[in-house]
Amino acid sequence: MKKIWENKSWIVATLTIIITFVVLIVSLESNSVTVKVNQLNIRSGPDVTYSVKAKVKHGQRLQVISRKSNWIKVIYKHRTIGWVASWLVQNSNVQTVTRLSEATIVLDPGHGGSDTGALSMTGQPEKRYTLEVAKRVERKLQERGARVVMTRSSDKTVPLAARPEIANSSSANLFVSFHFDSSDENNVASGYTCYFYHTGDSKRLAESVNQQMKNLPLSSRGVEFGNFLVIRDNSVPAILIEGGYINTKKDFNQIQKPAYQKKLASDVVDGIANYFKNNQ
């Protein structure tokens, strides 16, 4: 009888170990991810500003520990612990990871809803074109792998104070606000301007974007200080772009053209990319 009981105890202990091992394996598999991009950076912290500890090749598996601000804390090869951008891990459309693709960027289409913004000479509202351009920028940034947050994606009213708060609360790396200028009289001003409020990174971002826009069919009015709430109350590098004068016929003829909007969007994205390359 004693021998039978000892055998049962051994069997129970063995089954317990096997079940525990199976549960552990299942748990590990359910908390792991397979990398689908090439050279994914493992950083020392949950942001593109932290140093790179290792690079992970396509097809490698990472054990997930925790998540924070759209970043995942992982273990790589049972020894390297760090953070990876969650939106990149399984993004098979991105061939090579860059600092731009690891960034979170807030795009702010000016005005919206009951706030029409300035009007063209034919009565077209500024809010329409700021949204069209911002959406084009959004698509181009996402094609490069970046995480994009829009302050509005439709014709709705968003309070001014809420716009920089979106950047502050979404762990953003950059904030870009889109507008089209207006003068007191029709047809007396022309050109685009890039505004910053804070010196340092914001000014460098404005300079990088403005430099890239130099081949637009409108003239540059340069990089200027601007006391605008959406960039003044921002805790991240922030700029405001005036993409031309909506109440100047020559400018509006460009503003309403898809070709101009596409070129403006491409230039903004290239300017942002250059900013990241030059400010590592």
Image (cartoon, helix red, strand yellow):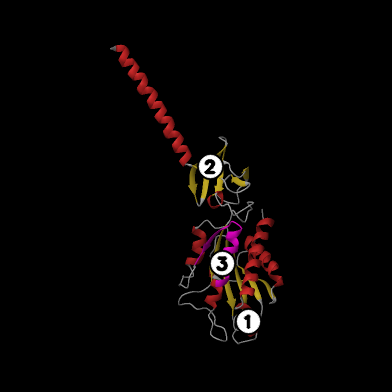
Q: Which mark is residue 253?
A: 1
Q: Residues within 10 Å of mark 2 (few under 14, many from 20)?
A: many
Closer to the observer: label 1 or label 3? 1
Decide which of 199, 260 is in the foreground and name it: 260
* Residue labelled with disc 2: 74
On the picture, is 162 further left or further right than 98? left
- Residues drawn in magenta: 132-151
Position in image of residue 126 (x %, y %): 54, 78
Nearer the N terminus, badge 1 or badge 3?
3
* Residue labelled with disc 3: 231
Position in image of residue 228 (x %, y %): 56, 71
Q: Residues within 10 Å of mark 3 (few under 14, many from 20)?
A: many
Q: Residue 144: within the magenta?
A: yes
Is 250 situated above or below 169? below
- Amino acid at pointer 2: Val
Is 210 situated above or below 52? below
- Amino acid at pointer 3: Ile
On the picture, is 200 further left or further right than 118? right
